[in-house]
Image (cartoon, grey):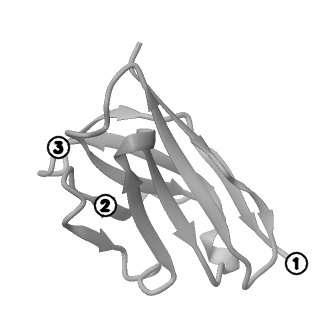
Amino acid sequence: QLQLVESGGGLVQPGGSLTLSCAASGFTLDYSAIGWFRQAPGKERERVSFISSSGGYTNYADSVKGRFTIARDNAKNTVYLQMNSLKPEDTAVYYCAAGTDYGLFRTWGQGTQVIVSS
């Protein structure tokens, strides 16, 4: 069974940090691009970060640029999203998805909740 599992969400104060993990089972991430997405209540899902299958290309939404960092560890079959300087507007359910370097995502995780609040 092909599966992505996110972890690392939780409650954090504004200005704090969290690291989200996206672990794959049933397949290798070596040949997959990975996107991190988020969806806040009442809002559309947005892609916050992307890393190509080679790891040589990354991009970020303007809202998180300079604060979030995406990285992959193929040996652990895991992709990470380091989130620093968190703001209340970062509160959302965060999902990872595996797909192609062209941005077609076929396999999604179940999501992990991030709440930024004092």
Residue at the spot of label 1:
118
**Do the residues under discs 2 and 3 have CB atoms within 8 angstroms?**
no
User: Label 1 is placed on what type of residue?
Assistant: Ser
Within 10 angstroms of label 1, few (less than 14), some, or many (20 or more) residues?
Answer: few
Q: Say above or below: 15 vs 77.
A: below
Q: Secondary structure at mark 2?
A: strand
What's the distance in space between the residues labelled 2 and 3, CA to CA? 11 Å
Q: Earlier in the sequence, mark 2 or mark 3?
A: 2
Residue at the spot of label 2:
50
Q: Earlier in the sequence, mark 1 or mark 2?
A: 2
Report x, y in % for residue 39: 53, 55
Q: Which residue lies most toward the left here?
A: 102
What's the distance in space between the residues labelled 3 and 1, CA to CA? 38 Å
Q: Residue at x 41, y 39 (%)?
A: 77
Report x, y in % for residue 49: 37, 65
User: Label 2 is placed on what type of residue?
Assistant: Phe
Report x, y in % for residue 9: 69, 53
Q: Say above or below: 58 vs 53.
A: below
| Mark linked to residue 100 | 3
Q: Residue at x 58, y 55 (%)?
A: 20
User: Label 3 is placed on what type of residue?
Assistant: Thr
Report x, y in % for residue 102: 12, 51
Within 10 angstroms of label 2, few (less than 14), some, or many (20 or more) residues?
Answer: many
Q: Which residue lies most toward the top here?
A: 1
Q: Secondary structure at mark 3?
A: loop
* 102 with respect to 38 (left or right): left
Q: Residue at x 19, y 50 (%)?
A: 103
